[in-house]
Amino acid sequence: MQTILSLGNALNQGTARGSAIGFKLDSLLKLTDTRARNNRMTLMHYLCKVLADKLPVVLDFSKDVSSLEPAAKIQLKFLAEEMQAISKGLEKVVQELSSSENDGPVSDSFREKLKEFLCFAEAEVRSLASLYSGVGRNVDALILYFGEDPARCSFEQVTSTLLNFVRMFNKAHDENCKQLEQEMKKLAENDKSKMQDESKNILQTSIKSNNVK
C-alpha cells in the first residue's frame, strides 16, 4: 500500500494531490486505467516491476490472503436474516413451552423434552449471537483498517475490491514475467545470430587470406 501511495504521489507531483497521506480503497482498481505512452504497460504493471526489483518477497502476497476469495462470497445481509430467523425460532419454542403448561398431565413428558431442548438451544443461540457480534466488530475494524467508513463502505465492497485487486496484480505480474522471458529469449537469439555472423566473417576472412597466399 505504501508503494502504491508513493507511485500516486510521484505521478501527481506538483498538484494538490501530490502529497496525499492515503487513498480510497477503490483506487486500487484504477491502477490498470493509467497507461504508458506505448499503451502496453499500465501502472499496475509498473507497480509489479518496482516490487520485483525492490521488494520481491511481497510478490506472492496473495498466498497470505488465500481466505479472501471465500470471504468475498459472504453476504452479511443473509447472515443477519439467518440470525434473526434463529432467534424467532427460539422464541416460538419458548411460547410453545409456556402454552403446554395448560395442557395437563398428558403433556408432562413433552414439556420435559422441550425444556431439555430449550436449555441446549438457548446456550447454542447465545454462543451464535456472540460469534455474530464478533463478526460485526471485526468487519468494522477491517473497513477502518483500510481507511473507509463502515457506515458508507460495506464488507462486501471491501472484499470484492481486494479480491479484484489481487487478481489484477497477479495477472500483471504474470504478463511482466512473460514479457521479460520473451525479451531474454530475443536477446539470446540476437547474441546467437551475432556470434554466427562473427564466425562466418572470420571464416570468410580466413578463406580469403589462404587464397591470397
Image (cartoon, rainbow, N blue to C red):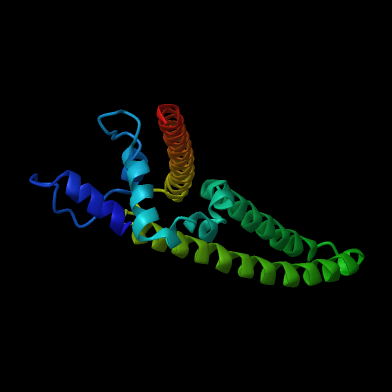
Give the camera-side residue of 190 and 90.
190
Q: In this image, 155 relative to 32: left or right?
A: right
Could you tell me which residue is drawn at 75 percent across and 64 percent down? Answer: 97
- Give the left or right position of residue 86, taking residue 97 as reference: left
Q: Considering depth in this image, is 104 or 45 the residue closer to the camera?
A: 45
- Report whether 99 appears left or right of 105: left
Q: Nearer the viewer, residue 48 or 205?
A: 205
Locate the C terminus by quadrant. Answer: top left
One can see residue 26 in this view: no
**Residue 90, position as x, y percentages in the image:** 68, 60
Q: Whole-percent x and y of residue 36?
A: 27, 34
Residue in view at x 57 percent, y 56 percent:
67
Count the labels in the image. Answer: 0
Q: Quadrant of residue 202?
A: top left
From this view, report whether residue 143 is shown above or below residue 167: below
Residue 44: image location, x then y, percent: 36, 42
Residue at 65 percent across and 56 percent down: it is: 86
28 or 78: nearer the eye?
Answer: 28
Quadrant occupied by the N terminus: bottom left
Residue 140, placed above or below residue 72: below
81 above or below 30?
Answer: below
Q: Which residue is located at x 45 percent, y 45 percent?
A: 173
Residue 66 visible within the image: yes
Residue 84 point in image, percent of width and height: 59, 53
Query: In the shown orientation, is residue 124 left or right of residue 74?
Result: right
